[in-house]
Amino acid sequence: VNPSADTIRRLEKLISFPTVSRDSNLDLIEWVSEELAGYGLASRLTYDRERRKANLLATIGTACEGAGLVLSGHTDVVPVDGQTWSTDPFHATIVENGVYGRGAADMKGFIAAVLAAVPQMLEAADRSCFHIALSYDEELGCLGAPGLIEDLCRAGARPGACIVGEPTEMGLVIGHKGASVYRCRIHGRAQHSARAPDGVNAIDYAARLISRLCEMDARLRRTERRHPSYDIGHSTLNVGVIRGGVASNIVPEDCEFRFDIRHLPWTDARAIVHELEEFARAELVPDMRSIAPEASVVFECVGEVPALETDADLPLVRLASQLLETTAAPTRVGFGSEAGLFDAAGIPTVICGPGSIAQAHQADEFVTFGQLARCERFLRRLIDCTDFEVAGERSCL
Ligand SMILES: [Zn+2]
């Protein structure tokens, strides 16, 4: 089964925009809004602080208050630095059974299928409502989506359901862990190493904080209530980056580390950070300030994605299973996504999209025609039957 030429054409175009998260996505957003304008549809854009990136929200249909279906995708892709590609990652290469290119699976294939389905949404517009929601900076910790969701609420929409098209090989996913990224900056006092006791060694204090984090991680592994659906059934902490110091004979003035919390729905990431902050405030900072009053330990949240834990009995889940013609039980995945944010905004949300997560972020990323065609079919059926009311209370079934 092959996908439509409309989907392929749009996927080729989407891949041609090198929307690596660190760069602007505005060219892509502009192209999408022109495509939509061709159908007489207006796009609402919300920007990042420097106006280098934008989210796009387009609503199709009437009766959008208290109803509607959100089709959500992120426009950014991960870098190709250091990867060996056999094709140009930013030029779609069509082969016998699929498409190669950065973002083919994660997740421009889904966006292409959604854009190709716009004519069908227009046909259903008198009885339904659809929101196309495209974000920036998902790969950096879902930085764009909160502004997009805020805009959706500002527009007066109360969608009854949301599909996030992350690559699940068109399987139905109803849960993922939460993911929070924090930065911790330690400021001490520089000194010649021969006079080390007169300085405040920022790396030394970072090390104490990190070993405290390791203890907390071990405690979670020992005592946290397990989630039976995850192969790692407890929350985890990981220090992923550390920077500090200038030379071995200088007491380092500054040190910074970043850590990431992957947590279960019932574990509060902020409480974990709060505990670490308290440790710093009560036990480290007074010590540091006895030598250098300007010393400090500062925590900063870089990105935060709530856990997704959608009730398997929701009408949306039953409907999606039926439309996917699957008897397989919905699953949970290890990666975080914007689904947690939509869910936290009170919109019942599932994840389902073409391509495999095994392809995502890899060299020679691809999506098969079979996957794109399955996605088209799923969207077609969703659009045909959609009558999503608040919280999925009423569906077409
Ligand atoms: Zn993704």
Image (cartoon, rainbow, N blue to C red):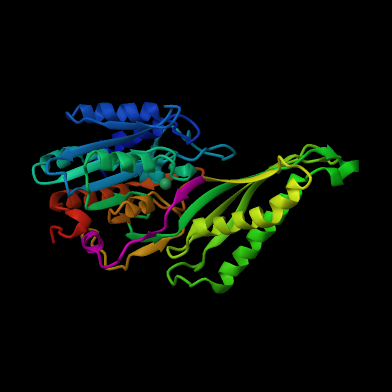
Q: Judge left or right: residue 310 versus residue 363.
A: left
Toward the right, the furthest residue is 194
Tell me if residue 264 comes above or below residue 134 in the rendering. Answer: below
Q: In the image, 123: left or right of 135?
A: left
Question: In the picture shown, does residue 199 fall above or below 339?
Answer: above
The quadrant holding residue 215 is: bottom right
Residue 291 highlighted magenta (yes or no): no
Judge by depth and name the residue closer to the eye, 389 or 36.
389
**Left/right of residue 242 with respect to residue 111 in the rendered view:** right
Q: Position of residue 105 (x, y in %)?
A: 40, 46
Residue at (69%, 57%) from the top-left corner? 283
Residue lying at 58% horizontally and 59% vertically, measured from the top left: 275
Q: Tell me the residue at 33%/26% (across/down).
A: 30
Residue at screen point 84% across, 41% down: 248
Figure quadrant of the C terminus:
bottom left
Answer left or right for 12 relative to 137. Answer: left
* Nearest to the observer: residue 123 or residue 146: 146
- In x, y percent, where is residue 191? 83, 38
Part of the protein shown in magenta = 302-322
Please say if 137 is above or below 161: above
* Residue 214 x, y percent position in the rendering: 65, 61
Q: Nearer the viewer, residue 371 or 117?
A: 117
**Residue 352 appears in the rendering:** no
| Residue 72 screen position, x and y as percent | 31, 45
Tell me the quarter of the picture where residue 320 sits. Answer: bottom left
Does the rendering let one see residue 262?
yes
Q: Is residue 316 inside the magenta stretch?
A: yes
